[in-house]
Image (cartoon, grey):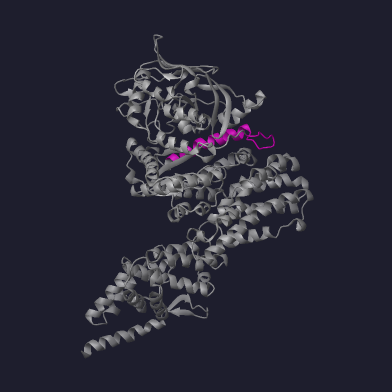
Amino acid sequence: MIERLNKQAEFLLEIDKLKNIQRRTYLSDGKRVENDAEHSWHLAIMSMLLSEYAEEDIDVLRVMSMVLIHDLIEIDAGDTYAYDTAGNADKEERELKAADRIFNILPKDQAEHIRALWDEFEANETPEAHFANMLDRFQPTMLNAASGGISWREHNIGESQIVKRNELSMLGSKRLWDYCLHKYVKPNIYKYNVRYDYEEIEYERFTLAYERINSISYDNMNIPEKYKAYFCELADVFKAYYKCITWLQENSYIYAAPVYKWYKEISLEEWKEINHSVNRFRYDSAYYETSYANPTKAVGEFGENIGSMLCALAAKTFDIGSLCFEARYFELTILAELFLEIYNIFECSEEDELSGSIKSAIYYHTYDYMDETTEYRIRDSITCHKPFFTQIIDNIDINDERSLYLTGENIGFNETNSFKYINSLSEEEIDKIAHTYTDGYIKGFELAGIDLAEKETVQIRYPVGFERIVKKAMQIFAENGLKSVILRRRQGVPQSGCIDCNPQFAYDHRFDKAIYYNKAIMDRQLSSLKNAYEKYKNEAEVYAGPAVIEYFGEKDFEPATKKEALKLDKAQRDLSSEYDILSANLVNEYIDHEKYSFTIIAFPLPEIGDDYEKIFTDTIQINTLDTTMYHNVQQAIIDVLDDCEYVHIKGSDGNKTDLKISLCELFDKEKQTRFHNCLADVNIPVGEVYTSPKLTGTEGILNVSEVYINGLVYKNLMIRFEDGMTKEYSCSNYDNEEDNHAYVQDNLIKHESLPMGEFAIGTNTAAFAMGIKYNISDKLPILIAEKTGPHIAIGDTCFMMSEDIPTYNPDGKEMIARENEVSKARYENPKEAYFGCHTDITIPYNEIRCLSAVYEDGREVQIIKDGLFVLEGTTELNTHLKNI
């Protein structure tokens, strides 16, 4: 008995040494650092008081015991600072050795019991260990904040270090970690006690820039009078952004949680007001037309050179309001600094020096930050580094309209009413939509023979308002081993986000890079892109590709062509096209097209009209059509097309189409085919057969009465082909033929000439009938419209950079028409082989007199006549056409 008590007493005296082990964390008054004994006592009290916040049911006494003994080993091993990389390298070895000595002072049964507790804490696998480890991280963070961040400042600690150390804290308590992050960590970033180190910028730099802008007013400007209104306008935009960011910070501190935890504390009206305050500059068309982001106003007041550059700066500033909600300090800071630099130019320069100095500032701003901006773009595209959108979707109440406002995207009629309608659908309907979307994606991998198990991430793109569908899709992807990445819309590039209710803005500024674009910038773009993919090459290897939800039905947009808007000169257009090709080749080095897939599906917007709900229902039906019938019908078409020499298409009722389309040669008809039998997999909905035409001998006129392409309408579009290349083109949008030619050139062709990259016959007569039924044929997206008649694509083939990957039809035949005479140059000169575009133009069934397969002997077999399918085995498709 005395021997047992002696060992216990010896142990108790030994652990008294814990009072001499100094930690790096200061007491709350900041007068000295705490010791290990004080730390352990504090954790024991916390375990008793905070146990209600544990993620799982816990044995509080066991947690208390665990935290009281967890640091005893530091009597020998010493305190290892959490952020000491070198010290942590041999920490485990030192602590295991200490545990062996110190715990074995006790009698065997107690030594084993306490050692088991310590081992359990270190392993961090039980609910009690999870909570104890959470407290071990919560307590020093609380004291660091209370002491004014002394220890954080002394060791130059960044936010990412704190977050990384606390990655496992949420296992113990998500609520305590949220409280810790937003009550203790975030406010100390704003006080400069913790570095903001997620991006290459300090929070202090952000604050200094915005405080400088906040001091700008009309009365204290020392610049020429005529420019004062411009700088006041832009300063007001930055002030609105800063006010929004401050509001978000204050609420996250008050509620000690991220926005998706406290958004219900804010009224819907206040959310609308905040949203409008940062988005009105970009999306309020009335405001835009009177602002300096409008080229007509800026150039009109300041002249062509200075006006166009100041206009581009205003547009860039207007377009980043939503980033306030994501606290994207890098983008927000560097743009504010560019604004201040240009403001300083006006303060210090003579009038004749302004143009060159402004151009130089914009040029070097673009050049100098190219590495960072490109890296963040690639990071956000293929990695889960900043899961802003996914965190929101995972945590919001999908039925609460206020949840729409959390991303900061502009919320208008389409977003609100899409949200309300989709939330009215049954769970079964949502499940059907989500499965159609995700199953098409997964099926794409199966058809291509790609092992999806080797992939880890899928990029989701969707319009705001579709969150309920996306949330279900994310769950299905997760069940298939894929984490979702959601990329925000950036500066006019549509990814996930709001519907552009002011498309004139994007149209006016589509060529703003004309200010600075040259060979050096292009080379810098390519080197930055390579550096970014090299950094994230492991993530690129497991990136599966995009799953896209598109939309259709927005209001008709006929852009005003403003002579004051910037345009690329020929050298810049050539460089831009060259970059498209070279960058695509570079990306292909890291994201292998042989191991990559995608899917696209589309749904209507409420703006489409009073029949929105009916159109949405019919679209679901079109997206889920039975593929068996289409497979058989399309195979009947392919069988005829594999035997003929060329295809002839003739328009009717004023349509001047008269096209001869040459087809590639087949060498083994038993094993080869010219056309792909395309069902509803990656490209939803079902319904087309397509090929890469032989360019030589392909000639004639393509004419469409009206077609929407990339949001722009083309009336009476006419393109003439010669040996498969575009030779002449026009439309009737404008009274002036010169303007019509320029409109097609600037927005559709964009090159000296383009090849016919695809010829296809769409078979989805149900979609065509829906377009006629609701008078929305002109509003159907390319994704659906291309299935509603024969279509031609100008630009690259469907197999760009994948020509050497065998493609097979369901019948086992290899589809060999994967290249044309232009793309064959890819081995010797890839810059000449590709154009970086592929634009589909569909001829509606009702504008076709005949589409025939023409044989070598002159014999013709008609596939379509007077808008109906007449080929044997295809007439079932006319059911929908005859009901129109």
The residue positioned farthest toward the right in the image shown = 225
The answer to if 572 sits in the magenta stretch is yes
- Residue 122 vertical placement versus 611 (above, below): below
In which quadrant of the rendered image does the N terminus lie?
A: bottom left
**Number of numbered tags placed on the structure image:** 0
Dominant secondary structure, magenta: helix
The residue positioned farthest toward the left in the image shown = 1
**For residue 880, which quarter of the picture?**
top left
In this rendering, would 500 be left or right of 230? left
Residue 642 locus on image (x, y percent): 36, 19
Residue 149 versus residue 65: which sits nearer the camera? Answer: 65
Residue 501 locus on image (x, y percent): 59, 42
Residue 176 versus residue 481: which sits nearer the camera? Answer: 176
The residue drawn where x is 50% and y is 46% is 464
Residue 31 in sight here: yes
The answer to if 244 sits in the magenta stretch is no
Q: Which residues are magenta?
A: 559-588
Residue 189 versus residue 768: which sits nearer the camera? Answer: 768
- Residue 504 vertical placement versus 47 (above, below): above
Residue 637 locus on image (x, y percent): 37, 21
